[in-house]
Amino acid sequence: MKYVAGAAGAAYVYDNTANRFFLSTTSLHDGKQGFTSDCRLQEAEEKAEANYTEFYAHDCSDKVEVARTSLWPTLVGENLFVTMLDFRSATKVHMKKLINSKEARDSIALNISCILGERIKPTLLTKHGVAQAPVDFDITKEGGFEGKNKYSLSGVANHDTGSYGYASRSISNPFIEKGEKHHDQAIASDRALTPKACIAALQPLLENSESLMPEAQFRAGQAFLILRPLYCGPKTWGDAHKVLMPFLEEKGLASSRENQRLGETRPFKRSDMEKGVARRNTSVAGPLLHELNMAIQKSIYKKDEESISDLRSKKLGEMKYIPICHFKMNDDCSGFEDSSGLADSFTGYNVSAYINHARLLSGEDRLSKQDVVAIVGCLNAVYDNASSERHTLREIAHGCFVGAGYKVEDAEAFYKDVCKDSAREFYGGEALRAAKSSQGVTSEKSRSSPNHPQ
């Protein structure tokens, strides 16, 4: 009997480690590549939706007592959540609801209109001393509008991994570098999106709704990412870092100091490395696996120098930073936080920056903090999955706020509020659902009691 109990115990430990580890959002037995599928996140999101709905079903939700149904410590997401799944699902649902408004819809629609060049005023180009501009402000007439770029797989389903994007690294799928040629083929494939396809998918959603519905949020996030290389191209408004950023800094719409603060979180930066292995963004396994893969390709598969050079392409240099585990300890070592391994999002930074550029030349006000929140929500809708090519909510917020000319502290304040509100909604709703279920069982027992009056 003790052997049976031991086997059962071992099976329990294995299942909870491989398929339900509290800091993981994936499982080994996911029917895909192992630890790469969105299935756990999708199930958790359904639960978070139900908790959110139950929490706000009460007229006085602000007075609801939040009593957690679990006795486990809260070690995730500003030490407010029990598991990474709770944190990821609760914050995702909160962000979806937060920007599902007319104000957010109008803000996103205005941004898209400005980016496409529909509102650009020639007199403002002269006034602001714009050094580079396209021949035609309407970028839908540019050749790149129907072409594909490095962001064309953003938010695109990946049937091999069960998530989105180009690739996902995991302990069961450690070698993800297949070379620049393979990456180019993936981008040229039918599943990759063009800026034209993004706009075609987004505009009806904006036109046919008074609010920014979740599908519109997702499509807007894709559009912002995939339009950026076109807007910041050599034939349009110029390189984001060489042309747009100096211009925006001159106009007081960006800060070089805040930009540097984002840069200090980058992989292998001294400031990041000094935090130690547990707290830094820089992955331990990612770079080691990258070099191991190169050694295997060269010594075992006997790849020639051209093939090795293709695998080491600078174009895909960031892939070597992708970790196996997407969590790290927080700065005060009191808990854990979500981590992409890619540090604060310069992708989010560039998105906010080029939108601000388009708004300025269209005679519109700069992005307000509420406008930035809408952008953060849209990018989070694209990136909040199990893919390795993603940014966390905190990283996105840092990038978007700083790119819009605000400070890292503004992003942190927003992020902490989201964590606090999400935890209250998630655990408050969970407690209310548990109480309702308990009352239902009690009522059923009472009705079935022999002494219950018929």
Image (tube, helix red, strand yellow):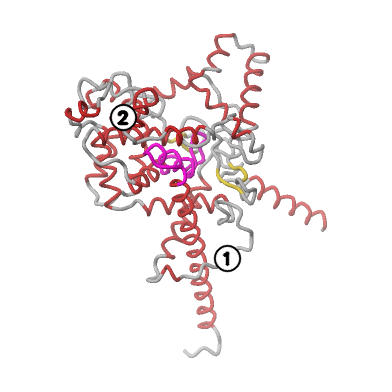
Quadrant of res 352: top left
Quadrant of res 59: bottom left
Give the labeled residue for mark 2. Answer: 195
Of pointers 2 and 1, the one earlier in the residue sequence: 1
- Residue 173 image offset from top left, x and y in percent: 60, 31
- Look at the image and tell me in which quarter the N terminus lies: bottom right
Q: Which mark is residue 50?
A: none
Q: Residue at x 74, y 50 (%)?
A: 10
Instruction: Report the label total.
Output: 2
Secondary structure of the residue carrying numbered label 2:
helix
- Residue 337 image offset from top left, x and y in percent: 57, 46
Q: Residue at x 22, y 47 (%)?
A: 208
Q: Residue at x 25, y 47 (%)?
A: 106
Q: Is residue 77 magenta?
A: no
Quadrant of res 248: top left
Q: Which residues are magenta?
A: 380-409
Give the labeled residue for mark 1. Answer: 69
**Which of the pair 260/32 is nearer the observer?**
260
- Residue 199 image offset from top left, x and y in percent: 28, 35
| Crowd band around label 1 with a 10 angstrom C-alpha radius: few (<14), some (14–19), many (20+) | few
Secondary structure of the residue carrying numbered label 1:
loop
229 to 47, vertically: above or below: above
Q: Residue furthest right?
A: 2
Q: Does residue 354 appear to the left or right of 21 in the view shown?
A: left
| Crowd band around label 2 with a 10 angstrom C-alpha radius: few (<14), some (14–19), many (20+) | many
Q: Does residue 53 appear to the left or right of 28 in the view shown?
A: left
Q: Residue at x 17, y 27 (%)?
A: 122
Q: CA distance from mark 2 to mark 1?
A: 46 Å
Amino acid at pointer 2? Pro
Amino acid at pointer 1? Thr
- Residue 47 image offset from top left, x and y in percent: 48, 57
